[in-house]
């Protein structure tokens, strides 16, 4: 699957998730592909993977993977539960 075709599929899956009637009732918003952006994209052999997000302030992000051998896509929706900074110690012995 080409990157363009895959991105269209991935954005469509995110829109489908947001446009579920239960979510639309909560957010009062309909999503289209222009509202979804790709954060990261990779293609290896016949497989594709993308991380996607939107400007909706709900801390959601999405992962879509396409298995070219099986010709099937996997959709995961995540919500950020924590964001913290972990600083490397000045004299950390784990540096190589």
Image (spheres, rainbow, N blue to C red):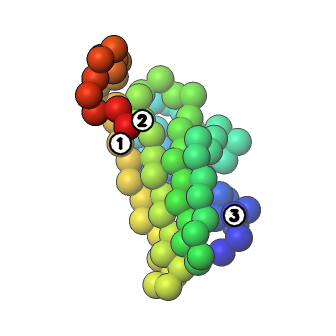
Q: Is residue 86 visible?
A: no
The Cα atoms of the two marked residues, 1 and 2, are separated by 6 Å
In the image, residue 63 above or below residue 22: below
Circle 2 residue: 60
List x then y, in percent, for residue 29: 54, 33
List x then y, in percent, for residue 4: 73, 62
Look at the image and tell me in which quarter the C terminus lies.
Answer: top left
* Other residues around mark 2 within 10 Å, as few (<14) / some (14–19) / many (≥20): some
Q: Is residue 39 visible?
A: yes
* CB contact under 8 Å: marks 1 and 2: yes
Looking at the rendered structure, the secondary structure element under dot 1 is strand
* CB contact under 8 Å: marks 3 and 2: no
> Mark 1 vs mark 2: which is more N-terminal?
2
Circle 3 residue: 3
Residue 75 falls left or right of residue 53: left
In the image, residue 14 above or below residue 23: below
Looking at the rendered structure, the secondary structure element under dot 2 is strand
List x then y, in percent, for residue 66: 51, 69
> Mark 3 vs mark 2: which is more N-terminal?
3
Query: Viewer-proximal residue, 86 or 39?
Result: 86
> Mark 3 vs mark 1: which is more N-terminal?
3
Q: Residue furthest top?
A: 90
Query: Viewer-proximal residue, 48 or 86?
Result: 86
**In this rendering, the label closer to the viewer, 3 or 2:** 3
Looking at the rendered structure, the secondary structure element under dot 3 is helix
Residue 78 is labelled as 1
Look at the image and tell me in which quarter the N terminus lies.
Answer: bottom right
The Cα atoms of the two marked residues, 3 and 2, are separated by 23 Å
* Other residues around mark 3 within 10 Å, as few (<14) / some (14–19) / many (≥20): some
């Amino acid at each position: 699957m080409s990157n363009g075709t895959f991105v269209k599929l991935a954005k469509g899956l995110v829109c489908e998730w947001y446009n579920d009637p239960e979510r639309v009732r909560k957010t009062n918003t309909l999503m289209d592909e222009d509202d979804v952006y790709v954060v990261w994209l990779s293609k290896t052999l016949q497989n594709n993977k993308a991380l996607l997000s939107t400007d909706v302030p709900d801390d959601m992000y999405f992962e879509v993977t396409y298995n070219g051998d099986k010709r099937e896509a996997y959709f995961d929706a995540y919500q950020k539960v924590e964001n913290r900074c972990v600083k490397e110690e000045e004299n950390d012995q784990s540096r190589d």
